[in-house]
Image (spheres, rainbow, N blue to C red):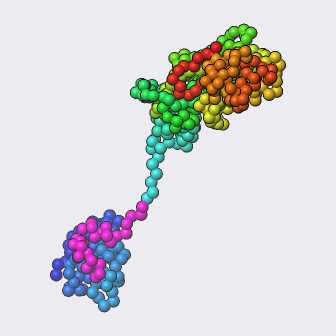
Amino acid sequence: MSVPRSDGDLGARLHPETRWVSSPGSPPPWSQAASAWPDLSGPMWVLWGVLLEAGLGPSSPPGSPTGGSRALSLCKYFERQNVDFRGKKAASLLLPAAPLRRTFHVGPCCPSSSGKELLMKLRRKTGYSFVNCKKALETCGGDLKQAEVWLHKQAQKEGWSKAAKLHGRKTKEGLIGLLQEGNISVLVEVNCETDFVSRNLKFQQLVQQVAVGTLLHCQSLKDQLSTHSKGFLNSSELSGLQAGPNKEGFLKDHLALAIGKLGENMILKRAAWVKVPSGFYVGSYVHGTMHSPSLHNLVLGKYGALVICETSEQSTNLKDLGRRLGQHVVGMAPLSVGSLDDEPGGEGETKMLSQPYLLDPSITLGQYVQPQGVSVVDFVRFECGEDEEATEAV
């Protein structure tokens, strides 16, 4: 019979917390049992000793009449698995596993609650991704204002880079924007590549910025009005306008930002403004209107018209009349105003007052306007995506 070694503390080698329950100096229990039952193999006695020290074994040795069936079945299992009962593998299978401990990482990379609040606030205010907002806060030492400025500068750099790559791609879609305030009316056109982008709020906000910038430009012109005045701005002139109140930089900078965010080529194509003194009224109409509550007084669409009327008295129906005149300009696309003395024309007529009235072709527009007590003196018509630049009506 092979008896396990007794010159080493088997329990201590199997597990650091294990100690034999026998008194100091006495042989381990499996050694005592081996002398009492000499017909059992050495490996089974090693297992028996481990079971006793682990508190898992029965009170009698394996093979005895009163117990050992559990030890015997375990022994056979381990023998099939080729387990060395004197090694640590047996201990890991027999001794209870150490309890799991839940740990929490509290290193510097985990943002504090105040840091999370700053991150959320910056994200809501700027609309940039969490990754970029986090990087901005880390770069600026948690300063919210500096982080916002840093984000805008980075986005502008990326936008200019993308704008250079997309330059030259066709921009036939977009929107016409109408903005009226006091005695000033503004029409602007901003183009993009697809109708999908034109419906994006960020693109519509760009149109609003262009309209506001044009309005502020018109307000800055100090002229004494005795009659109406009208002006046009081309693409390069629009790009050089200030972005407006509470906005830094020029319109071209915000154009680059929009290109960077939306990934399409865009153009600030043109703008027109009209300023009138008392005794004049500007009728307006936008076709294909898109409503956006966040854009306030701005009206968006695919066609737009301003019709300048002179009236001797303020009529209660001027708003409705101005809308109908605007509809006519959009639908009939006149090239000039003409005169009430002109002969009525047909469908190909280009003089506004001689054209068949859009809403009642049996009469001319001049015949419709004359009883209303107003005189049409000028108009502006924009069609989104048209090739020619806007020209003054004569």
| Residue 87 drawn in magenta | yes
Residue drawn at x 24%, y 73% is: 81
Quadrant hosting residue 322: top right
Q: In this view, does 338 lie above or below 49?
A: above
Between residues 23 and 76, which one lies in front from this camera angle? 76
Between residues 384 and 114, which one lies in front from this camera angle? 384
Residue 280 seen in this snapshot: no
The C terminus appears in which quarter of the rendering? top right
Residue drawn at x 20%, y 81% is: 41
The percent coordinates of residue 44 (x first, y second) are 24, 79
The percent coordinates of residue 89 (x first, y second) are 27, 67
Between residues 244 and 35, which one lies in front from this camera angle? 244
Q: Is residue 297 left or right of residue 48?
A: right
Quadrant hosting residue 76: bottom left
Between residues 11 and 6, which one lies in front from this camera angle? 11
The percent coordinates of residue 31 (x first, y second) are 24, 78
Q: Magenta segment, which residues?
A: 72-100
Q: Which residue is situated farthest in the bottom direction here?
A: 65
Residue drawn at x 31%, y 91% is: 65
The N terminus appears in which quarter of the rendering? bottom left
The percent coordinates of residue 225 (x first, y second) are 73, 10
| Residue 311 drawn in magenta | no
Residue 81 seen in this snapshot: yes
Q: In this view, does 232 lie to the left or right of 55?
A: right
Q: In this view, does 392 lie above or below 104?
A: above
Quadrant hosting residue 101: bottom left
Q: In this view, does 41 lie above or below 368?
A: below
Number of numbered callouts drawn: 0
Q: Which residue is situated farthest in the left direction here?
A: 1
